[in-house]
Image (spheres, rainbow, N blue to C red):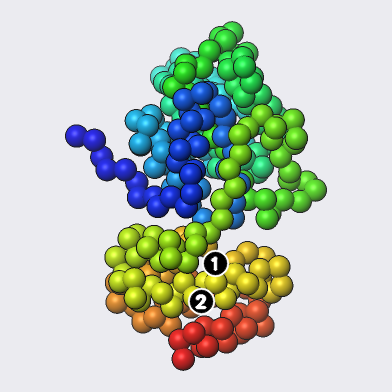
């Protein structure tokens, strides 16, 4: 029996664009702030298309071998073990590189042959040249708000992808998402949405990043579980945003104005 699709509420035509990209073997790049639903969107679409999903959380130490695979000792023998990218190519799956700008440059270079008309993955260590089947898709994401001189996606890589820009859902959509994910009544979710909007307006001033939809879901989940609203807000929408006592005091003033 097939498992239900991961819940995702479309903001526009992103589902149709994803499916078109998959059907035409086009790599896809998702751009948007942390916690706005990019990862859930990919999980939803992979399940919707019936393809296995291989997710890689990129980081500074991610190497090309982490993606493609390496020889490992097993029972006294040296055995080749596929990495997630190779597994996705062999199995006609979707490989999702989350926060791809965090990966080392030599790791992203291995993506190039898969993101043009060749659609191949050379495995130098095994001597294989894997041709990606039509079902395979490469998806990557990143948060442009965190880009700096040292961490940018090279134009030679970025221009190999079709790109979709994400943002936090419109208030009415976000209210439905948070209510669905947490089980909290939409009427009780509404003040949380208003607070999130106020806090997001501080981005670039007192805050590096606004409240994510993910944090809103956490907050509503705690409230639904019986935690007092102000306590839930404190641990999910104040403390995670800053360590600076003055900034947190300012955030708490905004909280008081909403929940007077």
Please name the residue that numbered disc 1 is placed on: 211
Task: Judge by depth and name the residue closer to the eye, 35 or 67.
Answer: 35
Under tag 2, what secondary structure? helix
For image coordinates 66% across by 24% down, the residue present is: 112
Q: Return the x and y of residue 226 as percentages of the image width and height.
A: 29, 77
Q: Is residue 135 visible?
A: yes
Residue 195, numbered circle: 2
Q: What residue is at 48 percent from the left and 44 percent from the top?
A: 13
* First along the sequence among labels 2 and 1: 2
Contact, CB < 8 Å: mark 2 with mark 1?
yes
- Give residue 22's mark: none
Crowd rating for badge 2 (residues with CA inside 10 Å; few <14, some 14–19, many 20+):
many
Q: Which quarter of the picture shows residue 109?
A: top right
Left or right, 50 with reference to 76: left
Label 1: element kind: loop
Report x, y in % for residue 202.
65, 73
Quick one: label 1, few (<14), some, or many (20+) residues within 10 Å?
many
User: Which residue corresponds to the image point at 43% horizontal and 26% vertical from the top-left?
Assistant: 93
- Looking at the picture, how far across and down is residue 132, in whole percent? 51, 17
123 lies above or below 51: above
Residues 137 and 52: in front is 137
Residue at point 59%, 47% (across, down): 165
């Amino acid at each position: 029996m097939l498992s239900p699709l991961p819940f995702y509420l479309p903001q526009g035509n992103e589902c149709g664009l994803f499916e078109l990209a998959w059907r035409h073997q086009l790599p896809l790049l998702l751009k948007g702030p942390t916690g706005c639903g990019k990862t859930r969107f990919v999980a939803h679409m992979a399940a919707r298309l019936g393809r296995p999903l291989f997710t890689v959380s990129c980081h500074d130490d991610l190497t090309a071998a982490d993606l493609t695979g390496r020889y490992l000792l097993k029972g006294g023998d040296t055995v080749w073990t596929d990495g997630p990218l190779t597994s996705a190519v062999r199995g006609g799956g979707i490989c999702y590189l989350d926060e791809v700008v965090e990966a080392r440059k030599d790791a992203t270079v291995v993506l190039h042959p898969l993101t043009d008309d060749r659609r191949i993955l050379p495995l130098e260590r095994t001597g294989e040249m894997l041709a990606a089947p039509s079902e395979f898709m490469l998806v990557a994401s990143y948060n442009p708000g965190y880009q700096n001189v040292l961490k940018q996606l090279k134009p030679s890589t970025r221009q190999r992808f079709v790109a979709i820009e994400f943002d936090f859902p419109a208030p009415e959509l976000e209210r439905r998402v948070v209510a669905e994910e947490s089980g909290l009544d939409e009427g009780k979710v509404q003040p949380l949405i208003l607070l999130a909007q106020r806090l997001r307006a501080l981005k670039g001033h007192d805050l590096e990043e606004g409240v994510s939809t993910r944090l809103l879901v956490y907050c509503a989940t705690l409230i639904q579980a019986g935690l007092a609203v102000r306590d839930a807000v404190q641990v999910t929408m104040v403390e995670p945003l800053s360590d600076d006592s003055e900034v947190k005091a300012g955030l708490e003033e905004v909280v008081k104005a909403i929940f007077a």
